[in-house]
Amino acid sequence: MPANAAESEAEPVSVPTLAGQQPDRAWFARPGIDVARDLLGAHLTRRDPGGDVTVRITEVEAYQGEQDPGSHAFRGPSPRNQVMFGEPGRLYVYRHLGLHTCMNIVCGPDCKAAAVLLRAGEVVAGEPVARRRRLAAGAVTRSVDLARGPARLTVALGVTMTDYGLDLLDPDSALSLEVATASGTGWRLPDDAVSSGPRVGVSGAGGEGALFPWRLWITGDPAVSAYRAAAAPRSRSGPRSR
């Protein structure tokens, strides 16, 4: 899985291998594609008075900041994306089409605006709580569908726009990230268990799978969301919307 030349020159950072170990700031400061790869199989837990929920991450997308035409940071800083230009390890939360809340983890060196979108996961603890949250947003019958998709994932975990900028490394944070015991050699999945391809719904150059194969998922995992290409642009001579 390619990263650009500038990122590949970054000094390697040791990846934690003990189950339950929380990454430090340097772990998040690595190139976005590397962080995305290592988030697969990790556990994200939301602690809440109404009940805790833990999700095993099964699908992610990497975005590389101002150099990436598919990134929200491509045109530079704005009030919406300002947290992306800060320290890694914080949440970038946004509303998609004004309807759905999506969650990213800021990564890469400070001010480089790289981030990883958490696209899907499996609820491995706290299913009754996650199911109650999902029922409020629409019925879900299968357990595997509770966090299968970026909007469902945030609903299952109770993530809202109030979590914008939340620091995953703050010991008092309601959200914490831990490694999972998904393989016998530690939490990092073997390469043959990971697939890659174009990002979902990204149009233009940023959606080119050959250039940006930065959607990563656990191969064959039923909790991975369905791939959908970006809609084709409407013709200027076509019918106008009302």
Image: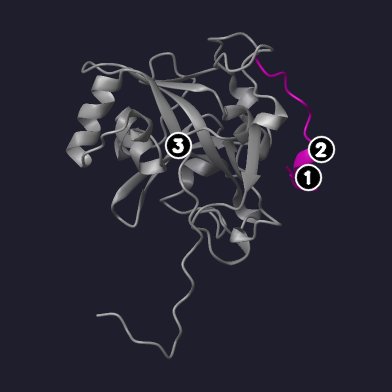
Q: What stretch is highlighted in magenta?
A: 1-16
**What amino acid is labelled 1 in the image?**
Ala
**Marking on residue 120:** 3
Observer-nearest residue: 73 or 121?
A: 121
**What amino acid is labelled 3 in the image?**
Ala
Disc 1 and disc 2 in contact, CB within 8 angstroms: yes
Residue picked out by circle 1: 6
Which structural element holds mark 1?
helix
Question: Would residue 207 appear left or right of 177 to someone viewing this image?
Answer: right
Quadrant of the drawing holding the N terminus:
top right
Q: Can residue 225 be seen in this view?
A: yes
Of the numbered discs 3 and 1, the one sitting upstream in the chain is: 1
Residue count near mark 3 (Cα–Cα under 10 Å), binned few <14, some 14–19, many ≥20: many
Disc 3 and disc 2 in contact, CB within 8 angstroms: no
Residue 140 belongs to the span the image colors magenta: no
- C-alpha distance separating marks 3 and 1: 29 Å
Q: Residue furthest left?
A: 136
Of the numbered discs 3 and 2, the one sitting upstream in the chain is: 2
Residue picked out by circle 2: 9
- C-alpha distance separating marks 3 and 2: 30 Å
Of circles 3 and 2, which is in front?
3
